[in-house]
């Protein structure tokens, strides 16, 4: 039980003995069988918990093997646990305060955000990461949109990441971008991720902290939309250097940008720039520019909130086609080249000029 008390529940942050999760322990002939009651049925972090239990007990003298089985807490047990936690945390409010994690060997961390869904954050994240890689930087992408992950598909990543002593090893795209997404860790990528906010937040933190990113010049974090628990977790727990806001030309654009910018300001995260996605469509027959979603409003929004405007990415069928085929790294266009230039001249200049790490690009 002393060894088991070193195992921390990844969702709640307290040890499993204190939480009453250890329901049964059987010992005989060097073999140990442990029954753990999960607080959430089919907990997405169950394998992590089992691995931690096996490691903690397996190191004890005389233990030859450890078998960990799981069950779920009853509703009565959950209610009692909730009351105990409320009492505990009310006496120690600092116990649940969110602290910044270590930046590891990562020079710069950029979050790609929006005030609503459907604006193409994942595509923009992938395009920016690909551009940084073409410029010769070591780049990683963290898919923090846990309930709607798409980075693995965009980069055509399908293998399961290896888990080694130093952590989870991210997969590498064909151009050398390191990437991690919850879809790569699920037994069935099509499984619906129906998780409560605290679980999503902890999974995001684990995707950052338990992954061995190695030495990176840039880590791009593709955030889920909105201003809820998940983006707040990234802002408060991951040492990001700033955020890039993605918007679209609809009339809602100003409100969308306002939400994203005001959230960033509220938690003291610099807004590095605004990209307007799906800004227009070029007719493939006559070359006429069609403002499919209305007149562009990104530049106006950037002026209103006093943030840099990085440009407009058109509604280009090639982006969707290449993303579906996992070939997003090969995408080129004159319009995106202009965005990439602004990104380099505005965002990278601001970050690199103030960087405490003098890393050079790879040759």
Image (spheres, grey):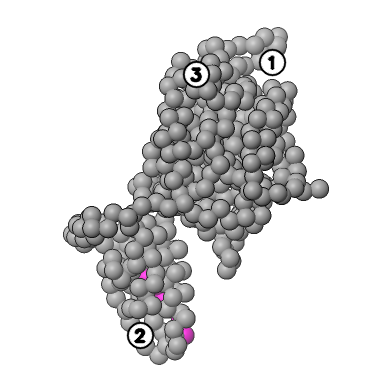
- Residue at x 39% of width, y 72% of height: 6
Which residue does the image show at 38% across and 38% down from the upper left?
Answer: 228
Q: Which residues are magenta?
A: 64-69
Using residue 23 as the reference point, say whether residue 294 is left or right of it.
right
* Circle number at residue 304: 3
Q: Nearer the viewer, residue 69 or 346?
A: 346
Name the chief secondary structure element in magenta. strand
Question: Which residue is at the front of the view, 168 or 218?
Answer: 218
Q: Tell me how far mark 3 sits from mark 2, CA to CA.
A: 67 Å
Q: How far across and down, in percent of the image, does residue 109 sit?
A: 58, 44
Local packing at callout 1 (Cα closer than 10 Å; few below 14, some 14-19, many 20+) is few
Residue found at x 45% / y 49%: 237
Q: Is residue 357 left or right of residue 86?
A: right
Checking the image for residue 284, the label placed there is 1
What is the tally of numbered marks visible in this picture? 3
Q: Quadrant of the N terminus?
A: bottom left
Q: Residues within 10 Å of mark 2 (few under 14, many from 20)?
A: few
Within 10 angstroms of label 3, few (less than 14), some, or many (20 or more) residues? Answer: few
Locate residue 35: give its quadrant.
Answer: bottom left
Q: Nearer the viewer, mark 3 or mark 2?
A: 3
Q: Position of residue 2 (x, y in %)?
A: 35, 78
Please give the label number shown on residue 137.
none
Residue 283 % position (x, y):
66, 13
- Residue to which mark 2 is pinned: 27
Front residue of 182/244: it is 244
């Amino acid at each position: 039980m002393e060894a088991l008390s070193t195992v921390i529940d990844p969702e709640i942050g307290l040890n499993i003995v204190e939480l009453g999760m250890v329901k049964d322990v059987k010992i005989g002939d060097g073999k140990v069988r442990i029954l753990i009651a999960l607080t959430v049925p089919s907990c997405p972090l169950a394998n992590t918990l089992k691995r931690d239990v096996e490691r903690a007990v397996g190191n004890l003298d005389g233990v030859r093997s450890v078998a960990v089985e799981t069950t779920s807490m009853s509703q009565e047990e959950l209610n009692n646990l909730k009351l105990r936690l409320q009492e505990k945390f009310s006496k120690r409010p600092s116990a649940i305060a969110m602290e910044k994690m270590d930046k590891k060997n990562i020079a710069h961390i950029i979050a790609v955000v929006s005030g609503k869904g459907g604006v193409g954050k994942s595509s923009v994240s992938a395009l920016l990461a690909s551009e940084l890689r073409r410029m010769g930087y070591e780049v990683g992408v963290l898919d923090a949109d846990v309930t709607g992950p798409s980075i693995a598909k965009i980069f055509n990543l399908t293998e399961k990441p290896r888990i080694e002593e130093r952590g989870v090893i991210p997969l590498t795209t064909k151009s050398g971008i390191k990437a991690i997404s919850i879809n790569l860790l699920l037994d069935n990528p099509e499984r619906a991720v129906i998780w409560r906010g605290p679980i999503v937040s902890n999974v995001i933190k684990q995707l950052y902290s338990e992954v061995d990113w190695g030495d990176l010049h840039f880590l791009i974090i593709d955030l889920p939309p909105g201003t809820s628990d998940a983006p707040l977790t990234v802002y408060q727990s991951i040492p990001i250097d700033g955020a890039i806001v993605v918007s679209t030309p609809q009339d809602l654009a100003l409100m969308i940008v306002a939400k994203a910018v005001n959230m960033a300001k509220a938690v003291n995260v610099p807004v590095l720039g605004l990209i307007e996605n799906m800004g227009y469509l070029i007719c493939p027959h006559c070359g006429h520019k069609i403002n499919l979603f209305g007149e562009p409003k990104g530049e106006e929004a950037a002026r209103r909130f006093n943030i840099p405007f990085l440009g407009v990415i058109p509604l280009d069928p090639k982006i969707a086609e290449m993303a579906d085929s996992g070939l997003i790294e090969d995408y080129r266009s004159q319009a995106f080249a202009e965005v990439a230039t602004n990104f380099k001249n505005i965002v990278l200049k601001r970050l690199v000029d103030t960087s405490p790490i003098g890393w050079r690009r790879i040759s």
